[in-house]
Structure formats: C-alpha cells, structure tokens
Image (cartoon, rainbow, N blue to C red):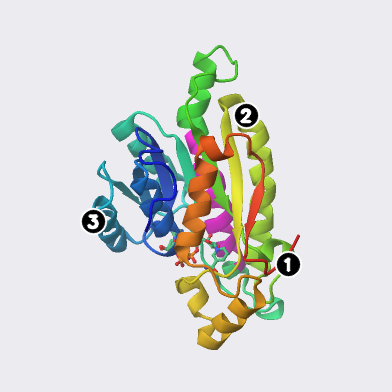
Amino acid sequence: MARVLREGAFEGETHIVTGAAQGIGNAVATALAEHGAQVVLVDLDAGKLEEAKAEIAKVSAVEPLVAAGNVAQEDDVKAAVASALEATGAINGVVNVAGITRDARIAKKSFDDFKAVLAVHLYGTFLFTREVAAQHWHPLFKENGNQPLADGVNRFIVNFSSVSARNGNIGQIDYTAAKGAIESVTKTTAREFSSYRARVNAVAPGPVNTAMLAAVGDAGVKAMGAATLVGRVAEPSDIANVVCALADPQISGYITGEVLQANGGLYLD
Ligand SMILES: NC(=O)c1ccc[n+]([C@@H]2O[C@H](COP(=O)([O-])OP(=O)(O)OC[C@H]3O[C@@H](n4cnc5c(N)ncnc54)[C@H](O)[C@@H]3O)[C@@H](O)[C@H]2O)c1
C-alpha cells in the first residue's frame, strides 16, 4: 500500500486495530504501520494474526504486537489493552474494525445470531473504548487534576459503521442495529473523551472488496459497484486511507463526533 501521509506521521505512537487478521482491519493496520505507528493487532484468529504480523513487520519501523482474543469478551479486551500498555507505555489510538454478519430475514433470524452480531460490533466497540479510557486516558486526566489534557499528544478512536446503518439492508436487522448504535456511541464518546483531548469519529463504508462481501457473489459485487457514483466497490486500502486521515491530527484535528461516509456516492445522506 502506498503511503498517503507524510513519512513518520505516527512515529512514536501505538495504535490498536481490531479485526486486523484480514480485510479492512488488516489494511488499516498496515497503513498505520507504514506511517510509523507501532500497531497492536487484535483478532479472534490467532494463526492469521501471526501471518498478518509477519507481513506488516515488513513495512514497519517498529515490530507489530499481537493480542489474540474475542472483542466481545470483557476479559480478552482487558488483557489486550493491558498488554499493549505494558509493552508500549501509552496507547494513542484505537480502531474498532472487527465485525461479523449473520444475514437472514427477520422472520428467520435467530436470537442467538442477533445477539452474536450485536456482541462483536457494539459490545466490542464499547469494551475497547472503555478499557483504553479506564486503564489509560482517564488516569491521565485524574493526574492532571481532572482538567482536560493539554499535553499535545495525539489520541483518537475510529469506529466502524456501514452505509446500511442509514440506508437499511434486507437480512441485516442485527448488523444495522449495531451500526446505528455505533454511530450514536461515537457521538457520546466524542463528548466524554473531549476531556482526554481524544477525537472520536466513525467511518461508514459502502461495499468493500473483502470476505464479508464475497457472499453476494461476482454479479452482486458488480451490481453494487455500478450503483455507486464512482463506479466500483471500494478496496480495503480506500478505507484504510480514510482512517489514516481521521487518525492524523494535522488533517482531522478539528473533526470529532463525526461519521464519515465512504460509500462512493452509493447513498447520499
Ligand atoms: N466489507 C464491506 O463491504 C463492509 C462495508 C461496510 C462496513 N464494513 C465493516 O468493516 C469492518 C471490517 O469488515 P471486513 O469486510 O474487513 O470483514 P472481514 O470478515 O474480512 O474481517 C473481519 C475480521 O474481524 C475478525 N473478527 C470477527 N469477530 C471477531 C471477534 N469476536 N473478535 C475479534 N476479531 C473478530 C475476523 O476474524 C476478521 O479477521 C466490519 O466492522 C464491517 O462491518 C464492511
């Protein structure tokens, strides 16, 4: 992937990326590492995570770290944040990418699937957000006499919504519920985390060329691309570049509480 920001834009920073074993999360972690960040790769899939680490190490100045675990499990998230802090001393950013789909129309949707989808997207996003605050950013705020941090350190969270949060999508009552909630959570977190001078935003991609999209088949992917104004589905790197921009205070230092639509004009809000 080509570097899109100045060299070393995130030098000295630690960024946690969930869902980093493949797809968009992997592209995000690669892009952040290419700009100098030490990335902490989180995913369920420990095997793929090691492969991702080896690949990302080739483009990183600093060795990536891995924290295998389930984003929907409180203990796993606590341990991932603690291990990142122990290894690096500070966390600058979290990108909550991990996700699953369990598509079925409402009449046939199992409650277990509904809960599983909510758990990975919404609970996972909440848990990483809470843990980075509880273990790191809130203690800094307290040390600062409960005054907003004024240390000039880059702090950010980027959450993942989807175009279907606002447009709806047949078969995805659980997924759209989670993504709509993540958009609201992003705004609340932005308000609370202003004390930490952390910017909190979300990206809402349209169709992206990953395993998650493979279920719709080649014809479906073509049709989705044709329905956009740019004439194609996104590549993971398109979305990773947007995350780099949101992570970079020189570009997005005045943007917080926003949901950035990256859908190629498929849906205009
Ligand atoms: N692909 C698209 O068209 C599209 C569109 C809009 C939004 N998104 C969002 O982008 C994000 C990434 O999607 P993708 O297409 O790269 O998906 P993907 O299926 O290619 O990758 C998802 C990754 O998340 C990991 N994961 C799943 N459950 C986990 C858990 N409980 N704990 C830790 N890791 C877990 C998987 O192992 C996998 O590596 C998701 O939040 C998705 O909703 C994707």
The residue carrying mark 2 has its beta carbon less than 8 Å from ligand 1: no
* Residue 131 can be seen in this image: yes
Query: Quadrant location of residue 45?
Result: bottom left
The one of 87 and 73 positioned closer to us in this rendering: 87
Residue 77 point in image, percent of width and height: 43, 45
Dividing the picture into quadrants, the one containing residue 114 is bottom right
Could you classify mark 2 by the number of other residues whose Cα lies within 10 Å: few (under 14), some (14-19), or many (20 or more)? some
- Rate crowding at label 1 as few (under 14), some (14 to 19) or many (20 or more) other CA atoms within 10 Å: few
Are the residues at dot 3 and dot 1 in contact (C-beta closer than 8 Å)? no
Do the numbered discs 1 and 2 sit on residues whose CB atoms are within 8 Å?
no
Residue 194 — which label?
Answer: 2
Does the residue tagged 3 have its C-beta within 8 Å of any atom of ligand 1? no
Q: Which residue is mark 1?
A: 167
What kind of residue is marked 3?
A: Ala
Q: Residue at 54%, 44% (x, y): give it.
A: 246
Disc sitting over residue 114 in the figure: none
| Range shown magenta | 114-132
266 falls in the magenta region = no
Q: Quadrant of the C terminus?
A: bottom right
Q: Amino acid at mark 2?
A: Ser
Label at residue 54: 3
Label whose residue precedes the other's in the sequence (3 or 2): 3
What is the residue that sits farthest to the right in this orientation? 269
Towards the viewer: 48 or 77: 48
